[in-house]
Image (tube, rainbow, N blue to C red):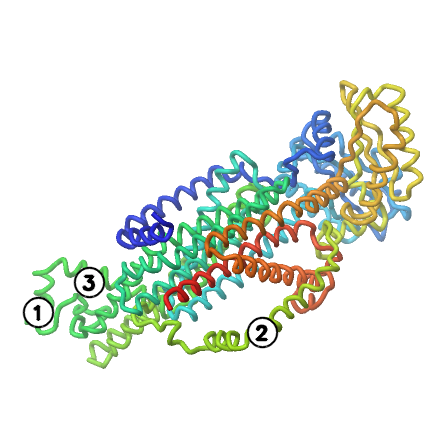
Amino acid sequence: MTLNLSTENLARESASHPWRVVWIWLFVVVGSIFMITNFLEEGLTTKFEFVNNPEVKKGENLLEQMKGPKGTNEVIVFQSSKFTVDDSEYKRVVEGLEAELVALGPEFIRLETLDNFYNTGAPPFVSDDRTATLMGFVMAGDFDTNSKNIAAVVELVHETAFEEADDFDIKIAGQATIGLDNREITQEDLEKGEAFGIPIALLILMVVLGAIFVAMVPLVMAIVSIVLAVGLAAVVGTFFELSLFVTNIITMIGLAVGIDYSLFVLTRYREERSQGLDKVEAISKAGATASRAVVFSGMTVVLALVGMVFIPFNIFISIGLGAIFVVVAAMAAAMTLLPAMLIFFDRLADWYRSLADEPGKWRCELLSIRFLWIPTGNGLNPILSMVLHPLRIVRALVAKSFFLVSLVVFFSPFTVSLSINLVMGLLSRFALSWSLGENNRQQGVITAAKVISLIVMAPILVAIIILLAVVLGIWILIKCMLNMPFGQTNYLRWISDVGVGKFEGTQTYTASGGFWDWLVQQVTTRPLVSLVVTAGLLVAATVPFFSIHTGFAGISTFPDELESKQAFLVLDEKFSFGEVTPAEIVISGNIASAEVQGGIESLKVLMANDNAFGQPRDVEVSEDGRIALLAVPVSGDSSGDTSIGAVTRLRDRYVPSAFVGVNADIFITGETAFNMAFFSVSKDSAWIVFPFVLGISFLLLLVVFRSLILPIKAIILNLLAVGAAYGLIVLVFQKGFMTGAFGFEESPTVESWIPLFLFSILFGLSMDYHVFLLSRIRERYDQT
């Protein structure tokens, strides 16, 4: 059986047994929600980690053997314009906050690491002008535990800062604190996208499809796809921890492909209905054509996303798997659930039209005894009819209830958009908040206020609907009692066409004569001019890409209003941010031997002559004497050129020189070394991902269209599109073009993971649309 017949039969069976399909999908959605609530928390991680074994990970593994799970370094920065560290008031504030942190207990903080100027007397804890001081500590547990517990620490710091705001400025920075701020920024951006994108998408769908209810079908398909994909991620997370950001990518890609695939099949179905085919036959024809294109398009996207799984880093693997899950889910929904939904909506539209075409069938629509489906002129009294035909009462009440809700929803389309927005917002935040634990849920991912607002909003929406229903019902009842003309026929037909959706008699592309027909005619009439203009614009947009500067943006590019950014600025000005993210030299060997001790001392001397390094901390040695840690502060942001240059010199020059001939293994770890390893992996993986995606896309198009020219043309055009996207990113975010107008933040670097991520996503999606168009063009060409 060919793929054409398979998609056709699948669509036909789904349309022939719609209730069966709906029940199956309901079971799937409920099962996905069960997986999410029971497994997602353990399946997601906030850690950024390699899945291979580079030098930085080897060093981290040795440190974990030596000290247990590696906690994050956090620093509290105290500043005062009124006191110095020599004043008793200053000491009172610092020691008071220290006592509150100690009270949190060892499950939050490694109490032995809680240091400040007053209990150590160490000069690095005090600024040169003695108006600022530091309190440093290490969070207890691993990175995921730190991410959950940091909210309680930040809350204590905020309480003290508020109480002492007149005389002191107190802020906190560190790896877990930066991670918390980063998640809040991500969540805020996601909420903004939902609040703007979903209503706009619904409005566009209403305009395109010319109806309210049918415009919601693609959104429903997208929501179902997202729920299924998150459920799959929860299951996979029990075997391989996925990055927390997998939920973000699932939501983003799910909305895109869920709407696209559904819209493609839906428009084809309406076109076939307009040409006289009945419901099931139209679904079958759409399945044989549009669904087939959806399958090939989805396969193209999936294969492009597989390239991300080859990158040995958990974020790339998680993003790739999450996007693959939601694309496959969207394909399945478009081929099975969508045909069943279309049958239901088409039947509903027919029902309303039948009421409009038989005005004697109903004497009045709402809140009237004659609303009991009694044919005109049957000679029966309405009351007697109720007695003789009680089932008519039930049938009429059910019909009236549905009709009433339909009327109110059509009169209040904003309630539909608002309700969908609330549901999508809650859905996309659910997995994120659940995985972060109770502390972060209280700290703003899903706060009590948000939950209360959702609870309060539901009865408000219901109250609005009831109020509108009552007003509308009274109005119609008065018209009925006064025998005023109601316009029943036109109104019911309007509900059928504009409310539910028009299927029969829909205008097809062959008779539209609109803007897109005109545009296609202009392009095909003057192909050379169109090619030069379009290619020229794409090439011009690509030019800024050649000046791209990739790196790790780091905290220095965070918005200035963030507390961790403000604390970083103080650290960078008066101390060394390297106190928070020092370079860590891990030594494996006989630490007590003279040659290893000599190497350590030689290394300290070399770093002392380099201004980028601060005063090394005391050497820590494991109980068995086989592992040692020498931590040294590094100037600047851990992702900045200063710190990267310093660690590069440390790794390539100082360590080889100090430990020449020494029988020991030396590993450089720490935040800066981690970022450098990440840059290297991203750069090296590009030579794997790019050829794989291009090659597999070429082979797939070669099989689908049986042509050499079409795949080559498609790849060239899609490379131009991806290049233009790269160029615009550099122009806007790196060069700062119109960042103020859009409210964006300018950054001197583009995150090193973005080119790889965008290539797989954009190439897959742009090829997706390419297959859509080529499939329809090929079909039309074969017909003529």
The alpha-carbon separation of the residues under discs 3 and 1 comes to 16 Å
Looking at numbered disc 1 in the image, what kind of residue is underneath it? Asn
Residue 267 can be seen, yes or no: yes
Q: Nearer the viewer, residue 377 or 66?
A: 66
**What residue sits 8% from the left and 69% below the top?**
381
Q: Secondary structure at mark 2?
A: helix
Q: Residue at x 82, y 41 (%)?
A: 648
Q: Earlier in the sequence, mark 1 or mark 2?
A: 1
Q: Where is 467 relative to 238, above or below?
A: below
Which numbered disc, 2 or 3, marks the residue closer to the eye? 2
Quarter containing the C terminus: bottom left
| Mark 3 and mark 1 residues within 8 Å of each other at the beta carbon | no
Question: Mark 3: few, some, or many residues within 10 Å (few <14, many ≥20)?
Answer: some
Would residue 544 appear left or right of 784 to someone viewing this image? Answer: right
Circle 3 residue? 396
Q: CA distance from mark 1 to mark 2?
A: 76 Å
Residue 469, compared with residue 437, is above or below; it is: below
The residue that mark 1 highlights is 381
Crowd tier of the residue under label 1, counting other residues whose Cα lies within 10 Å: few below 14, some 14–19, many 20 or above: few
Label 2 or label 3, whichever comes before in sequence order = 3
Secondary element at image label 1: loop
Compared across the picture, whether 660 is left or right of 452 comes to right
Secondary structure at numbered mark 3: helix
Residue receiving disc 2: 528
Q: Which of 471/784 is in front?
A: 784
Front: mark 3 or 1: 3
Amino acid type, callout 3: Ala
